[in-house]
Image: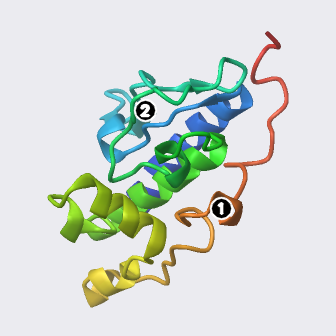
Amino acid sequence: MPWPALVRGLTQVLMALQYLHDCRVVHCDVKPANMFVTRDPNTRFLTTKLLDLGIAYDLDGPRPGPTEPLCGDPNYIALEQTMHGGVIDPRTDIYAIGVSLYELATGVLPFEELTTAPLHELLIAQRDQTPPPPSSRLPPARRLNLRTGSTGSSAAPARRIPRVATRARGRCRPR
């Protein structure tokens, strides 16, 4: 996918996530398979839609209990989603966006070599290792100065940016 189209598509997904976060909902399953790209038949503009809120978490609802099953795609799941008592908040989705951007830019997941490994090995790697820089996985003609680990895709929630964008007023009605 050309860089400008990728940037436009992810910008639309980020806007959808900001709306969800403003409504105090965390998607919890952000990944490229849940990003639907379509072209308007009249204008020919690309539109990207964020799908599948089946495991979304209402921040005003009950907290998940210790017997809740692990939900989400392990390749995109944030560390806090794998721990009992982990705090789910908008940074959970920001981690998944970082992993998605990595994959969409390079064509491979950050820990591609572990996609067929036992689940615990993938989760340990996501927690303890820094993936190769995306630029190392791109052909020279497509390389940009892309970084991971410092904002979106850090395993530590405290190192992630806290919000997709500044809060937009009036997007959600109070409950």
Report which residue position mark 1 lands on.
160
Instruction: Relative to 141, say whether 126 is above or below.
Output: above
User: Residue at (18%, 61%) from the top-left corner?
Assistant: 117
**Does residue 1 show up?**
no
User: Residue at (75%, 24%) from the top-left corner?
Assistant: 171
Q: Nearer the viewer, residue 49 or 134?
A: 134
Q: Nearer the viewer, residue 49 or 111?
A: 111
Determine whether, in the image, residue 121 is placed left or right of residue 87: left
Q: How is the image coloured?
A: rainbow
Instruction: Relative to 88, say whether 127 is above or below.
Output: below
**Does residue 34 show up?**
yes
Instruction: Relative to 154, say whether 57 is above or below.
Output: above
Q: Tell me which corner region of the image, top left, top right, bottom left or bottom right, holds residue 141.
A: bottom left
Secondary structure, mark 1, is loop
Residue type, mark 2 in image:
Lys
Q: Can you give x and y, in whole percent of width and height, for residue 62 in the image?
A: 66, 18
Determine whether, in the image, residue 126 is placed left or right of residue 111: right
Q: Can you give x and y, in whole percent of width and height, for residue 8 in the image?
A: 48, 52
Residue type, mark 1 in image:
Arg
Report which residue position mark 2 lands on.
49
User: Residue at (52%, 30%) from the top-left corner?
Assistant: 66
Q: Are marks 1 and 2 in contact (CB under 8 Å)?
A: no
Q: Nearer the viewer, mark 1 or mark 2?
A: 1
Task: Quadrant for the N terminus, please.
Answer: bottom left
Residue extending farthest top = 175
User: Residue at (37%, 58%) from the top-left corner?
Assistant: 123
Q: Can you give x and y, in whole percent of width and height, for residue 15 in the image?
A: 60, 40
Label 1 or label 2, whichever comes before in sequence order? 2
Crowd tier of the residue under label 1, counting other residues whose Cα lies within 10 Å: few below 14, some 14–19, many 20 or above: many
Q: Can you give x and y, in whole percent of width and height, for residue 29 in the image?
A: 42, 37
Whole-number angstrom distance, CA of label 1 to CA of label 2: 24 Å
Determine whether, in the image, residue 101 is placed left or right of residue 161: left
